[in-house]
Amino acid sequence: MAEQTGQTAPEIRDDRAAGKLLAYVDGEAAGVIAYFVMDGTPSALVAVHTVVEPGHEGKGIGGSLVKEFYAMAAREGVPVVPLCPYAAKWASRHPDEAPEAPEELVVRAKGQLASHPELY
């Protein structure tokens, strides 16, 4: 595994059916991004919430998750709508890796989340 600021980089796995991008360190759950695939055309991946487990904070887990989330969306050819405050802040700090979603997609994503709170 790659080294990251003196720490082992997390293993990141996508569980699309559950809407979770999960980070593991030494086989232990270390963090997660809850997300959904937005309905309609164009589609988007919508980051709803990012959580880093106690004991794993400050190790770059959240940043690794968001970076992989944007890379995953790029591989799929869809934009990211970062409704999660952490993901939005990360995106604003890494504009080269996190293209801004069109406002129309942001409005649609917020509407879909409001009408389906179970996605949160």
Image (cartoon, rainbow, N blue to C red):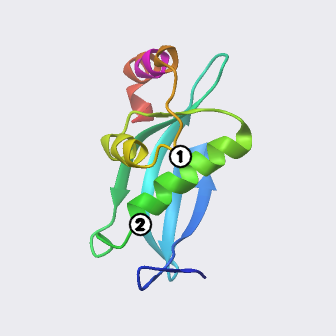
The disc label shown at residue 61, or none: 2
Q: Residue 69: x, y in percent?
A: 55, 49
In front of the other: label 2 or label 1?
1
Quadrant of image for the C terminus: top left
Q: Which residue is labeled 1 in the image?
A: 96
The disc label shown at residue 47, or none: none
Q: Residue at x 41, y 79 (%)?
A: 5
Q: Residue 28: x, y in percent?
A: 46, 76
Does residue 25 appear to the left or right of 92 in the view shown?
right
Identify residue type, mark 2: Ile
**Magenta span covers which residues?**
106-110
Does residue 1 appear to the left or right of 114 in the view shown?
right
Identify residue type, mark 1: Asp
Q: Residue 34: x, y in percent?
A: 45, 45
Q: Main secondary structure of the magenta part?
A: helix
Say if 2 sits above or below 43 in the image.
below
Q: Residue 77: x, y in percent?
A: 71, 36
Q: Residue at x 37, y 20 (%)?
A: 114
